[in-house]
């Protein structure tokens, strides 16, 4: 019995050390064996064994040589190879589902789109997704390439209880066991996460400036979520439901039970709702002329075009949207004191002034020292980047101890 315990302990230590070395090279970039030994505190003979194993599994590859401190001696650089394994990434949005077979960095081998028919009930939609995933798994296995190491599912909604409970108002899911459903069918590790968080992962992997340790990523989508990163790690104690913080005391009622929530006042939908109301009141003359009696539903591009053409009413709506965003940003700065706030969302990319107004408003509302500490950045996380974010998130989770079969 004691013998088995000892073997178990040795195997566990082996796993921990392999993970430690791989994690270091993944995060740090190309590294030589002596550096890896120094930074992990492992002996050089252990490093030789572990690196040998990781080279065999193709998780590390050799890439050139560098001079070492010992005169005349060179050391081989090792780098992480994300093509060693494949993963399946599923991005479930309110308009469609994208499914991709990618490597661990999100480079897609196959990518498919399923349009969401809102007449489909949850189970029918999930059955469609599962059939597509099944096809991808079969094709990948038949091709005999790298093994599939896991499935990542990103959704617009709350993911609670360690991936096991999904609640999504946009999908009308109250408590869906997505993880169990997929794990039971495909016998692979499955991770479910909020899609703002996986997008944040994509941005984080693009790199930060030297000395930047504290970054907040804000995703302006159907809702408004924030993800708090410290030292490149997610602060999991932050739930980030910024969209349901109050920015207007007697504002419109929200489905969450509150009034004047940020996401009701700062979103593409909010701009459209207010513009429709203004049109109904006989305002927005430029927009009215541009639409020229058109009866199709108003879209955001039309509102933007009217603002650009000088419609003061639409400009006012966009400005107020930017001001509400600025109030929310000031609250984020006062709570977190981040060095960088990255903001993603169609609302900003299509209308320069909303971002500018929001940043001015935020800076005017916070202490000068906090204001000087923070910089603002707009990003555009498109469908490809969103898939990459899922794969990168998945790689982090897969290499957590106990998931990957080292
Ligand atoms: Zn709300």
Image (cartoon, grey):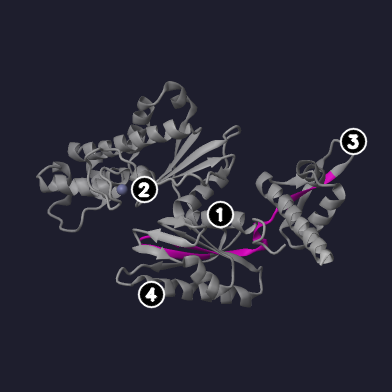
Farthest-out residue, top: 368
**Residue identified by numbered label 1:** 393
* Residue at mark 2: C-beta within 8 A of ligand 1: no
Report the Cα–Cα distance between label 1 and label 2.
23 Å
Q: Residue at x 45, y 54 (%)?
A: 195
Report the Cα–Cα distance between label 1 and label 4.
27 Å
Tell me where residue 301 appears, x and y as whole percent.
28, 49
Query: Circle 4 — which element?
Result: helix
Farthest-out residue, left: 282
Of residues 389 and 41, which is closer to you in this image?
41
Q: Are marks 3 and 2 in contact (CB under 8 Å)?
A: no
* Mark toward the start of the polypeptide (1 vs 4): 4
Q: Which of the labelled discs sits on residue 346, or is there none?
A: 2
Report the Cα–Cα distance between label 4 and label 3.
66 Å
Q: Are marks 1 and 2 in contact (CB under 8 Å)?
A: no
* Residue at mark 4: C-beta within 8 A of ligand 1: no
Dividing the picture into quadrants, the one containing residue 109 is bottom right
* Mark toward the start of the polypeptide (3 vs 2): 3
**Residue identified by numbered label 3:** 71
State left or right for residue 137 relative to residue 224.
Answer: right
Asked if 87 appears above or below 187 in the picture, the reply is above
Report the Cα–Cα distance between label 3 and label 2.
55 Å
Q: Is residue 87 magenta?
A: yes
Q: Are marks 4 and 3 in contact (CB under 8 Å)?
A: no
Tell me where residue 327 appears, x and y as whole percent.
33, 34
* Mark toward the start of the polypeptide (4 vs 3): 3
**Residue identified by numbered label 4:** 124
Chain part drawn in magenta: 75-100
């Amino acid at each position: 019995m004691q013998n088995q315990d000892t073997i178990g302990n040795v195997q566990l230590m082996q796993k921990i050390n392999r993970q430690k070395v791989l994690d270091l090279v993944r995060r740090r970039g190309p590294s030589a064996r002596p550096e890896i030994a120094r930074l992990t505190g492992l002996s050089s003979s252990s490093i030789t064994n572990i690196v040998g194993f990781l080279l065999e599994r193709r998780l590390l590859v050799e890439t050139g040589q560098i001079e070492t401190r010992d005169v005349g001696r060179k050391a081989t650089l090792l780098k992480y190879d994300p093509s060693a394994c494949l993963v399946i990434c599923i991005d479930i949005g309110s308009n469609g589902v994208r499914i991709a077979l990618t490597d661990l960095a999100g480079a897609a081998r196959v990518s498919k789109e399923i349009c969401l028919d809102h007449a489909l009930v949850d189970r029918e939609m999930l059955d469609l997704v599962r059939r597509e995933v099944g096809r991808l798994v079969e094709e990948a296995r038949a091709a005999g390439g790298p093994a599939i190491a896991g499935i990542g599912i990103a959704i617009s909604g709350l993911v609670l209880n360690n991936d096991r409970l999904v609640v999504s108002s946009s999908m009308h899911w109250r408590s869906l066991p997505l993880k169990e459903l997929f794990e039971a069918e495909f016998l692979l590790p499955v991770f479910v996460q909020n899609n703002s968080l996986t997008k944040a992962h994509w941005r984080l992997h693009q790199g930060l400036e030297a000395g930047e340790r504290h970054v907040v990523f804000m995703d302006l989508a159907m809702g408004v979520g924030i993800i708090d990163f410290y030292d490149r790690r997610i602060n999991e104690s932050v739930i980030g439901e910024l969209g349901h913080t109050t920015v207007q005391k007697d504002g419109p009622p929200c489905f969450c039970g509150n009034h004047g929530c940020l996401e009701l006042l700062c979103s593409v939908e909010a701009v459209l709702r207010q513009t429709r109301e203004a049109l109904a009141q006989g305002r927005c003359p430029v927009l009215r002329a541009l639409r020229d009696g058109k009866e199709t539903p108003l879209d955001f591009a039309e509102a933007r075009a009217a603002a650009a053409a000088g419609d003061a009413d639409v400009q006012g709506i966009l400005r107020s949207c930017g001001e509400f965003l600025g109030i929310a940003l000031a609250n984020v700065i006062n709570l977190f004191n981040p060095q960088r706030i990255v903001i993603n969302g169609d609302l900003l990319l299509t209308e320069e002034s909303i971002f500018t107004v929001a940043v001015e408003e935020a800076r005017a509302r916070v202490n000068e020292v906090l204001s000087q500490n923070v910089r603002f950045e707009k990003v555009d996380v498109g469908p490809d980047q969103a898939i990459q974010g899922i794969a990168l998130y998945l790689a982090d989770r897969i290499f957590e101890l106990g998931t990957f079969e080292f």
